[in-house]
């Protein structure tokens, strides 16, 4: 008997620990097994602990499975603590139909009037985009608390293109004498961010100061995000400075990310350098920003600083590092990065392996790219596209086309980018019939809506083989705002093949589009000169002078070794 009591006490301690922190699914499975063998699995309290733990775990689906098991074989009934965590689990796995079935269970058991259960239901319906159900439940509630209003405002903020409704709900909430809490203000500020209204944010900022919520960090971070989104950098910096010791890594990440999105990488770097304890998210944010902004040397320099400060990079870091190596076409650095990945056992997911393939192709090592590709256990559309594009860019059009057919044979579904890559490969290798058939299959079999990139590849393919009149017919299918690029490609082909009559017609179409760029007028001038139309050449030059059309000055740099 005493041994049984000790076992029960130990089990209750384990169940209590589930409430206090998150656990792996394996650990929860072990506790579940223990509850079944000790006979405690039929207690509602045990159910709730296990369901809550699974709802927070990486496998929230098990929360619903455990619930189904317990209501089938248990002797006790679920209570008002059971359903809120179940609805949370359904929200995480986007199970709208299952959540509705649970709603029916709530009504059957008689918990439909419990405000905690109702609030959880509204939040669930909002999370799975069932806004009508959320609003209906909200309207039928006789009693609402601040959590109720927060749930319905969050549902509107998430699911509508009209976040102004959230502000209207705030006014109704105040009229119902419900005082907003910090979560309310975060939701309202999120809605203002979607509206891109800094004026609304300033008014809320003043109100928050009056309420004494200025030091509440999640409210301040929401305000910071609003100012950054609205490009009010002075206000954002002032608020960031006022936070001083209160600010956290989230505050820093919001400000740095804002500067990155505005293209002010140096400002982002200044703030980054001031942070003492940086997490991997911040490091990755800036390394990725440098790689994306075509500043590969800065990206690699920051990566080396990570090593010096003993920050362990992850797969996201290495994707950006490989992109920097590819941008520099630096095979040696790319190979070192690959060795670094293997040495530190960094998880090589599909994204990282695709980045390796892209790097090797851009650095000219087709063999290493193909070895990496064929060693992949799983391949997605992006990895197939990377190899097809790489082969096409190196002039292996037939091989790229063969790989595309292999991709189809293995059941992989090509996307719009895949067709751009394979059409470009056909263009570079002069595979006219194959390219035209692929374009037709793209539209008819895969129902991919052609974009300017696809038309551009097809136009380039036909232009390279002198089929210029066929190209003209394709251009007519484009939207007016997309035709300019296509007509420029066609006019270049007219210059190449001395098609003066068609070139005249295309030149007139370009002028109708009213494009006053340096490149366009130079292209027209070159064509007129080749056609011997010197009067037109002089007219084009005068237009350029009258409108002060000048070529943008270029920049160049030298790397000096000392």
Image (cartoon, helix red, strand yellow):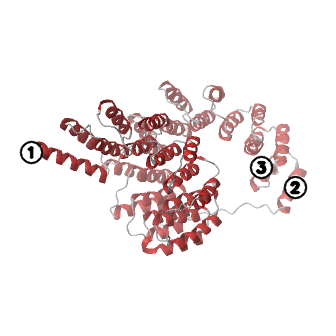
Q: Earlier in the sequence, mark 3 or mark 1?
A: 1
Q: Quadrant of the C terminus?
A: bottom left
Instruction: Kindly state the secondary structure of the residue where label 3 is placed.
Output: helix
Image vertical order of residue 533 relative to residue 176, above or below: above
Q: Which mark is residue 2?
A: 1
**Place of residue 251 in the rendered image (x, y in percent of width and height, measured from the top left):** 47, 65
Residue position marked by numbered label 3 in the rendering: 523
Q: Is residue 218 above or below residue 87?
A: below
Asked whether the beta carbons under mark 2 and mark 3 sit within 8 Å of each other, the answer is no
Disc 2: which residue: 538
> Distance between the Cα atoms at labels 3 and 1?
94 Å
For the N terminus, the quadrant is top left
In which quadrant of the rendered view does residue 394 lie? Answer: top right
How far across and down, in percent of the image, does residue 401 sit? 55, 29
Bin the neighbour count of mark 2 within 10 Å (Cα to Cα): few under 14, some 14-19, many 20 and up: some
Disc on the earlier residue, 1 or 2: 1
User: Disc 1 or disc 2, which is closer to the eye?
Assistant: 1
Q: Secondary structure at mark 1?
A: helix
Residue at left offset 60%, top offset 28%: 446
How far apart in space, not on screen, are marks 2 and 3 (Cα)? 14 Å
Residue at image point 50% right, 64% down = 219
């Amino acid at each position: 008997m005493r041994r049984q009591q000790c076992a029960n006490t130990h089990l209750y301690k384990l169940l209590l620990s589930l409430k206090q922190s998150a656990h792996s699914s394996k650990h929860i499975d072990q506790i579940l097994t223990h509850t079944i063998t000790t006979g405690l699995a039929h207690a509602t309290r045990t159910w709730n602990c296990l369901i809550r733990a699974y709802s927070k775990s990486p496998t929230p689906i098990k929360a619903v499975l455990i619930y189904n098991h317990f209501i089938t074989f248990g002797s006790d009934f679920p209570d008002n603590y059971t359903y809120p965590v179940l609805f949370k689990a359904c929200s995480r796995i986007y199970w709208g139909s299952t959540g509705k079935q649970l709603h029916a269970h709530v009504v059957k058991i008689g918990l439909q009037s419990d405000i905690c259960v109702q609030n959880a239901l509204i939040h669930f319906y909002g999370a799975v985009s069932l806004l009508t159900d959320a609003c209906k439940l909200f309207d039928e509630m006789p009693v609402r608390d601040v959590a109720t209003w927060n749930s319905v405002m969050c549902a509107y903020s998430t699911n509508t293109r009209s976040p102004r409704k959230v502000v209207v709900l705030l006014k109704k909430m105040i009229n119902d004498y419900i005082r907003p809490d910090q979560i309310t203000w975060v939701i309202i500020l999120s809605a203002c961010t979607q509206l891109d209204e800094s004026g609304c944010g300033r008014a809320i900022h003043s109100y928050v100061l009056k309420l004494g919520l200025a030091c509440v960090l999640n409210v301040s971070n929401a305000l910071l995000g609003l100012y950054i989104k609205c490009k009010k950098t002075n206000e954002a910096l002032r608020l960031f400075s006022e936070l001083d010791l209160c600010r956290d890594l989230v505050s820093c990440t919001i400000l740095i990310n804002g500067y990155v999105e505005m293209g002010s990488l140096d400002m982002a770097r200044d703030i980054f350098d001031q942070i003492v304890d940086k997490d991997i998210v911040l490091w990755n944010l800036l390394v990725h920003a440098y790689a994306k902004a075509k500043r590969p040397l800065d990206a690699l320099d920051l990566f080396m600083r990570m090593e010096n400060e003993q920050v362990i990079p992850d797969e996201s870091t290495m994707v950006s590092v490989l992109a920097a190596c590819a941008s520099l076409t630096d095979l040696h650095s790319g190979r070192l990065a690959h060795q670094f990945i293997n040495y530190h056992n960094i998880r090589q997911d599909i994204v990282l392996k695709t980045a390796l393939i892209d790097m090797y192709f851009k650095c000219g090592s087709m063999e290493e790219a193909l070895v990496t590709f064929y060693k992949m256990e799983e391949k997605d559309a992006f990895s197939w596209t990377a190899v097809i594009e790489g082969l096409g860019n190196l002039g292996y059009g037939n091989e790229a086309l063969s790989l595309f057919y292999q991709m189809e044979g293995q059941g992989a579904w090509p996307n719009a980018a895949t067709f751009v890559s394979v059409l470009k490969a056909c263009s570079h290798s002069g595979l006219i019939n194959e390219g035209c058939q692929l374009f037709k299959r793209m539209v008819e079999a895969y129902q991919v809506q052609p974009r300017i990139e696809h038309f551009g590849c097809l136009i380039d393919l036909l232009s390279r083989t002198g089929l210029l009149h066929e190209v003209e017919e394709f251009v007519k299918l484009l939207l007016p705002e997309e035709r300019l690029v296509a007509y420029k490609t066609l006019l270049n082909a007219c210059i190449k093949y001395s098609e003066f009559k068609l070139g005249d017609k295309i030149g007139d179409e370009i002028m109708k589009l009213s494009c006053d760029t340096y490149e366009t007028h130079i292209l027209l001038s070159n064509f007129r000169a080749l056609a011997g139309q010197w009067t037109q050449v002089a007219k084009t030059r005068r237009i350029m002078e009258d409108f002060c059309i000048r070529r943008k000055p270029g920049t160049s740099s030298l790397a000096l070794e000392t």
